Structures are given as C-alpha cells and as structure tokens.
Image (spheres, rainbow, N blue to C red):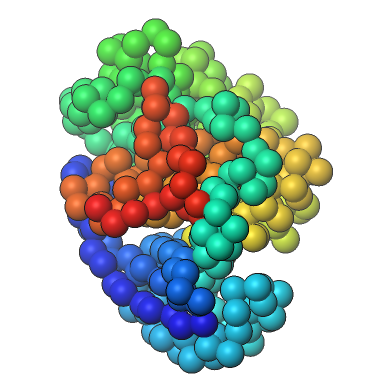
Amino acid sequence: MHTHIEPFTVHKRVALTISRGTTAQTTNILVRIEHTGIEGWGEASPFTVGGTPQTSENLLKALQQLAPALEKFSPYDRQQIERLFTKFNTPSAARAAIDTALHDWLGKKVGFPLWQMWGLDRRRITPTSLTIGINSPEGALDRMRQWSQVTKLQFLKLKLGSPDGIEADKAILLAVRSEAPAITQLSVDANGGWSLNNAFKMCDWLAGQGVKYVEQPLPPGQERDLPALKERSPLPIFVDESCFTSRDIPQLADRVHGINIKLMKAGGLTEAIRAIHTARASGLQIMFGCYSDSSLANTAMAHLSPLADYLDLDSHLNLTDDPFVGAPLHNGRLVPNDFPGLGVIKN
C-alpha cells in the first residue's frame, strides 16, 4: 500500500483559551493510504499534553519515517502495523492518522459506513457540547451568542482554571448561566488548572449552578489526590489529560466517574474501542473529546459516538477553513452519514 502525507493549516474562527494557553491555528496532517485503487483517509493533529509535545513538525517527521516501512503491508495487516508503531515509537497522533485511514479504507472496500460495520445505533448519539474558552464574562457571553448562530444551544462546555483564580471562573459561569436557555446543560473543564483545595470549593459551588460534571480538575500527575476529591465532590469527576489509552483506565477506576477519550491521545479508532470496553468493564462513564481536529477526525469519532455518554466534538465547527465535509450536524448531534468508510469528502 502507498502512503501519502499532506500537511494542512486550519484557522479558528475564535481563538480558544484554556488553562495552558491560547490556540488560534494549527497545522494538521492528512494521511491517505491507497491500495487496489481505494483510498483511506486519516488525520493527525498536534497536542502538547504529557511527555514529548506532539508538534506538527514531530508528527510529520514520524509519518515520513514510517511511510516506507508500510509499503510492504496491506490494509488487512493491522496487527503487524501495530507492531510497527511500537518498533518506530510512533507518536499517538501519527498512529491515529494511519489507523483511521485503514478503517476508512476497509469501509470503502466493503461498501459500508463504519457505524454500520460496528452494528451501532445512530439514534443513541447525544448532542455535542459547544466549548467556551477562558474569557471575561462579557467575552464568554459573546462566544455563547456566536455559537447560537451555528446550532441550538443544548450543551455548553466552559473552560475554567483561569490564571486569575476561581473568582474569575465563577464570574464566567454566572454570566453564561444568566443568559443560557433553561434547557441548556453545562459542563466544566478546568484542564488541570485547580489545586485540590480550589477543586473542593469549585465542585461544591458548581453543583449549585446545575453543572453536569467537572473534567480534569487537577493537574496530570496529581492523580493521588483524586480519591479524596471523588469522595467529597457532589459532581461526577472526569479525567482527560490523566488518561491516554486503555492501559491508564484500571488505575483510575476507583478515583473518577468517567474518562475523556480522544482520537489523538488514544492513537486511533482501534485503541479508542479498547478504551471504551475497558472503561465500561471498570464501571466508568465515557465522553469523547477533540483537539484542533477538522471534520475528518471528528467524523471518525462520531462513528463510535453511540457508545459515549457525552460528546465534545466541536472543534471543526470553529474553523474558518475546514478542508473536509463529514458528519453533518442535526439538532446539535453530529451524525455520520450512510457513505462507505468515514463518509468524508474534500470541501
């Protein structure tokens, strides 16, 4: 099989600020795998959580090194290709691009969309949350109004963990809550921006504001404090930066209520499925998230989304120049179509 690698840059309509910084644009990488006249597509997008940062440059270099070794394989040789990832120490986002392309190829080969190959029920897909980054109260309100022009506001995710402290966090949430429709659900993601003491205070306070759950309240590496927080918190605790693959889940099972699975962290749909089954076997809830992913990567996760409790697959909705068209938005729900494979085309 032949591997083609194409970097592309996407720009955010509104820059996103979280506790670790602000992102306005990223250079992602399209991987096209061609075999017997059929082409499968996958995407690698950079992120900087934990270990060596998976920058665009690092991902491009890793994919270029791996491509010649893939030539002797076919898309059916997925177990051998996984061993190749280990041999080359391939970053997870680069693995995600290749693994997704292999799934897309297989779906196109047999003529079925991935959700149907997996026997999933699209009616079980929940609305995706729409993210509001750290901002002033006025800026948060403005962002909420912008989102309302894209789709009905059913679920808002507020990024907290402001460098200005928890009083600034409270001001953001109160502003949004004051104008959000009564039917709008809220979740909070601190991206590891709170101390344990502040997490105690905020979870108590947020419960009174009707928030559904809190994501990554403590910094990664501070998992030893999660049992105390879980015991005291009136809200469910999810982790993102503390959980990359299925291997991380068993040691978190007694200290959180759920995990956030992301295609780039997991290293592809194959590992995402492992993580889903491991989480369910561990009694945990599941959400799907994204980085600065285009419609290509978010559509890939949308095919698995009937298996998730919560979805945060909105990054492509904030792009001015998304190169792809994938799963359409129906009443706030990202629903994959009936076309074979991922069902993604060039914009």
Query: Residue 252 location in percent, x, y?
Result: 72, 48
| Residue at 34% in and 54% down | 345
Q: Is residue 99 left or right of residue 315?
A: right
| Residue at 20% in and 43% down | 14
Residue 87 occupies quadrant: bottom right
Q: Is residue 35 left or right of residue 115?
A: left
Q: Is residue 122 above or below residue 73?
A: above
Q: Is residue 13 left or right of residue 304?
A: left
Looking at this view, is 293 or 75 the one in front? 75
| Residue at 38% in and 46% down | 326
Q: Is residue 59 above or below residue 128?
A: below
Query: Residue 26 location in percent, x, y?
Result: 27, 62
Looking at the image, the residue that sits furthest to the top is: 182
Residue 159 occupies quadrant: top left
Looking at this view, is 293 or 105 the one in front? 105
Q: How many marks?
A: 0
The answer to whether residue 65 of the structure is visible from this angle is yes
| Residue at 56% in and 62% down | 109
Query: Residue 338 location in percent, x, y?
Result: 49, 41
Q: Is residue 209 above or below residue 235?
A: above
Q: Is residue 37 left or right of residue 164?
A: right
The answer to whether residue 290 of the structure is visible from this angle is no
Query: Residue 321 location in percent, x, y?
Result: 20, 52
Looking at this view, is 318 or 76 the one in front? 76
Looking at the image, the residue that sits furthest to the right is: 281
